[in-house]
Amino acid sequence: MAVVGLLCMASTAEVAAIDWNVSGLVREEIAYSMSGRDNELNLRGNVFNDRITPHYTHAGWGSGANSGALTSTYIDEQGRPGLFQQAGVAALPVAPRPGQTNISTVAAGAYTFSPVNCRHGHLEARSAGSRGLVGDGAMLGVLCPNGGGSSFIPTANAAVRGARAAGISAQGAALDGDNPFNMFNTRAELDVSASLTSSLAAFVKVRVYADGTSAFGDGHNGDLFGNPYWGRRSTLTEFNTRNAVLDLPALYIDYHDGPLWVRLGNQTIAWGEAYFFRVMDVVNGLDLRRHLTLGPGGEEFKDQRVASPSLRVSYTFDNDWELDSFAALFSPTVVPPQDSAYNLIASSTSLNESDEFDEARNTLNFGLRLSMPFNEHFTLMAMYTNRRNPDGVFRYAEAPTFNAGLANGFCAGAHNETNSLLSHYPGGALTPGGTTFPAGPLQGAMAAAGLDAMPRLLGHGSRTLDHCGSALAPDPYAPSSTEFWHLLARSRLDPMKALRTAVDEWPATKWSAREVFGFGREHNVADALRTIESFHSLFGGFRAYATREFKREQVFALGANYITHSDDPGSFFDSIIIRGEVAVTPHKKFTDLGLSRHFIEHNEIVSALILEKFHRFSDAFPATYMVAQWMHREESDLFGRHLSGTESVDFNHFIDKTTGDFKPEAFVEDAAAPRGSSSANYVVFAFQQPTSSLIWRFDLALMVDVEGGYLVQPGIRYRPSDAWQWDLYANIIEGDGRNDSVMDSLDFADEMFARLSYFF
């Protein structure tokens, strides 16, 4: 109806013949990796694929002291320990207080039945005829190629012990892949504009993008373009397959009448002036599926902004002040697909966003910006935006009841493996020297102790999919204990808190780990390794499920532009554009470091100072464009990750390299928690220098993370005619190795990239 209204308004104006303009391009985009390694967050690039990794709490590891080290015991709010720790707690001289957390009766290795773990360990145990811990077909354990495996598997080799196992996992090695290209893609764009009347115009851009990268390598490749937003579409106006996408990034009508300008349709809105940075540019999310944000810096986010159906209205007053406003349909940021070159989410985590997107679907973002030029040198801007954050905040999500062809033994219900253990346990000691139980089933012992049966009311305040009650699911490709810790730390999370959250916020997992096994909450490294290595020894490999919630927030911003003036127009200090932007988001939600549904909440302040200048250093060359910038962020880094997650400590720091035993720090609460940063600061310098013929242009962009690390992007553009253009760039990225700078998350992406374009 709004389009019809605009057309009716235009019908009163003088109607002329429609003026059509058609243009476009065909481009080949190629990026060749210079890093010598694949992205370790992808399955094909994971360094743990072929490793047989030790369990540090197994009795055969090191001196064996780790196995007997006492770890925390769960005591519920009524003062009751978990079922398997009843006898140990009863032997204490003083009965525990309700909720007491400083009781330690659980030997770290009491349930670590396997000395090692590896890829396909669960499937190998099944193939070897494992009947499980008590012969009921549940808790099948793990078995590795060297024979190391859970002790209740008949073919497990007890001589393997816990020492670093010899050999490699051939099945795991088969998952490795190699592709020298990060990108080998073809793009075609068609732009059609029509001047319908003197006041009405229309524009449409059709874009086709085909990814051919997988043809040049091996290993697993993900679905490069599908997402569960609109069917399998990632944006509203696209059609996609696994390797190609056709979309309409622009489809709108423009109407103008003197000081009034209206744009209606699918569009992007770019507010703000920063180079590489986004301060006031908060209207649209980003589509990171093609080249992340690693394209030519001078293009800023032009190709990444996600278009959405929007109404934009601008009015310019007599004093040249402009009020610009919009209302737009919410569209999320599209993250790089897993198992793709620029993936940022570990392949051991499954991302399922469909329910949370449905909750945000069809909601509106809106805002306005007032530009106030006071004179030819100084302009002040004020902005307000009310939006659902398109980047979202991540948390654990409910796992499916079946995964990889296997029933999910973590879920409450008929396939729950802990409940099966209680049902089929014959009696006696579950482990040598452990608690002695009467003849099963042990559900009776649970009831006699006043403990709850397997939970039935699931969800626990979260949206549920299959009524599982757990965020975990079995998976033959799942990470080992070592890998689990490493990948969480690599992702700027807290591995100990992530483990606690996966247990405590999901009722089926909590019931198993806390109320049956009696594991206390994991606040130190010894506790954490006890829980995860016990789980791997019993349940085999498992993966986690996660989702994104798109929380509503308000962004307030101020900006100012000042243009310097010198009496000497040739002076370097004449016509320098000085820009400043500050954005404040009260009560902004950030991803919790343990992937909890209780998000981090802080007031976020982001600011940037930009200096721009065109200056002609010689009459032999056109003017050089230069820009220098500084950005300061109080709470998050450039990717929106909360700064409390920087500088994670790998758990190997807590293992004595000589004896293999736990260091004293392994028993210190939160000693392995990320150290965090108080703020983030980034500095950018860039220039572009064309030659006198304008056929050649030389570019350089440099971004430095003050915490340590840099990105250098040199480039050359060659355009011999209006129809042809060659671009050659490099991304040289270096982090400091402490996981405290944004470059540490990107240093796998060193590359040369070229673009050959034909314009018509």
Image: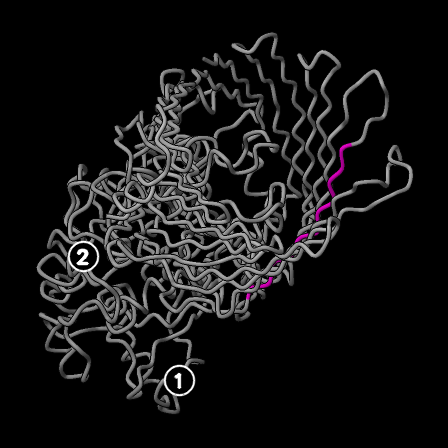
Residue 412 showing in the rendered view: yes
Front label number (1 vs 2): 2
Q: Is residue 59 visible?
A: no
Which residue is under mark 1? 100
Q: Which residues are magenta?
A: 604-614
The three-letter amino acid code for the residue at tag 1 is: Gln
SS under mark 2: loop
Q: Residue 228 or 330: which is nearer the viewer? A: 330
> Does 288 sit left or right of 694 as displayed?
left
* Residue most extreme to the right: 568
User: Who's the residue at 33% across and 62% down the image?
Assistant: 502
Q: Is residue 610 magenta?
A: yes
Give the mark, 1 or 2, whose residue is nearer the N terminus.
1
Residue 187 position by quadrant: top left
Give the prevailing secondary structure in the magenta stretch: strand
Query: Marks 1 and 2: CB-CB under 8 Å?
Result: no
- Which residue was labeled with disc 2? 465
**Above or below, 396 relative to 442:** above
> Dividing the image into 4 quarters, which one contains the C terminus?
top left
> As rendered, which of 255 and 175 lies closer to the eye?
255
In this rendering, the count of numbered labels is 2
The circle on residue 206 is: none
Q: CA distance from mark 1 to mark 2?
A: 34 Å
Q: Residue furthest top?
A: 720
**Tag 1, which secondary structure?**
loop
User: In the image, residue 67 lies at what x, y percent?
Assistant: 42, 61
Residue 535 falls in image quadrant: bottom left
Look at the picture and state if 267 lies above or below 678.
above
Q: Which residue appears at 41% of the width and 37% of the height?
A: 199
In the displayed structure, does residue 630 sit left or right of residue 321? Answer: right
Q: Is residue 691 found left or right of 54 in the rendered image?
A: right
Q: Nearer the viewer, residue 393 or 304?
A: 304
